[in-house]
Image (tube, rainbow, N blue to C red):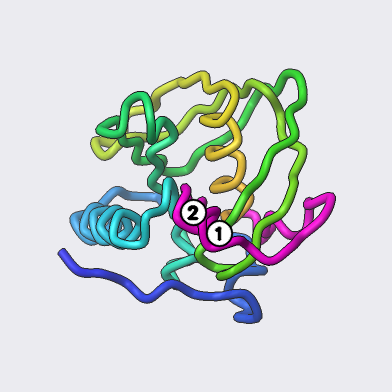
């Protein structure tokens, strides 16, 4: 596996909508593993294809960094099909280094996606986990958290060491 370069704000690739994956090949699986390694090396809790220059509908996320840090999700062709409630919280992104922002997201979501075997799975996420999944999903649509932020500000050093959402 290999670490990938993270694409940063200003690169037009981050503003494009990703294409669906028609077949889950070994290359796709290797790319997802590279994304996982890159995310973990940067201290992130999620990373999407466009952030490593891959315009495919896939992301990797660890939405429970404190409670279940080993729990990892590979989301291929994800679709958020139900949202409920509202929460406001801080987000950061390795594609927007040194910045954070307050963003309103759903409190709870239902999402379906293919796993590494190509099987469709249904998931429910709440609170921070829902925030992570929505953040990553937005990357596939060419949307950055700064587009939705109520305010964006420079991250404090202690905040940057917290979870850098992708």
Q: Earlier in the sequence, mark 1 or mark 2?
A: 1
Q: Is residue 161 magenta?
A: yes
Residue 21 horizontal side relative to residue 159, left or right:
left
Where does the N terminus fall, quadrant-wise? bottom left
- Give the quadrant of residue 3: bottom left
Q: Residue at x 50, y 64 (%)?
A: 94
**Residue 158 place in picture, x, y as percent:** 51, 55
User: In this orientation, which residue lies closer to the viewer: 97 or 148?
Assistant: 97
C-alpha gap between disc 1 and disc 2: 6 Å
Quickly name the residue at label 1: 93
How many numbered discs?
2
Q: Is residue 139 magenta?
A: no
Q: Residue at x 37, y 55 (%)?
A: 43
Residue 57 horizontal side relative to residue 137, left or right:
left
Secondary-structure class at tag 2 = loop
Q: Is 12 placed above or below 109 here?
A: below
Quickly name the residue at label 2: 164
Residue 146 horizontal side relative to residue 37, left or right:
right
Residues at marks 1 and 2 touching, judged by CB atoms closer than 8 Å: yes
Q: Residue at x 68, y 23 (%)?
A: 107
- Give the quadrant of residue 9: bottom right
Q: Which residues are magenta?
A: 141-166
Secondary-structure class at tag 1 = loop
How packed mark 1 is, by other alpha carbons closer than 10 Å (few <14, some 14-19, many 20 or more), is: many
**Residue 4 place in picture, x, y as percent:** 32, 72
Q: Which residue ends up furthest to the left in the rendered image?
A: 1
Q: Residue at x 60, y 80 (%)?
A: 11
**Residue 27 place in picture, x, y as percent:** 23, 61
Q: Is 77 placed above or below 95 here?
A: above
Q: Which residue ends up furthest to the bottom in the rendered image?
A: 11
How packed mark 2 is, by other alpha carbons closer than 10 Å (few <14, some 14-19, many 20 or more), is: many
């Amino acid at each position: 596996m290999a670490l990938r370069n993270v694409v940063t704000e200003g690169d037009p690739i981050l503003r494009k909508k990703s294409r669906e994956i028609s077949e889950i090949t070994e290359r796709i699986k290797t790319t997802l593993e590279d994304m996982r390694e890159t995310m973990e090396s940067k201290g992130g809790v999620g990373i999407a294809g466009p952030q490593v220059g891959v315009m495919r509908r896939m992301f990797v996320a660890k939405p429970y960094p404190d409670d279940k840090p080993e729990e990892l999700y590979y989301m291929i062709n994800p679709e958020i099909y139900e949202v409920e409630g509202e929460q406001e919280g801080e987000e950061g992104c390795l594609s927007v280094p040194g910045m954070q922002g307050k963003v309103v997201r759903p409190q709870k979501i239902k999402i379906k996606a293919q796993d590494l075997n190509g099987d469709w799975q249904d998931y429910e996420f709440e609170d921070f986990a829902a925030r992570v999944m929505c953040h990553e999903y937005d990357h596939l649509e060419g949307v950055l958290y700064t587009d939705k932020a109520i305010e964006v500000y420079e991250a404090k050093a202690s905040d940057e060491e917290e979870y850098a959402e992708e």
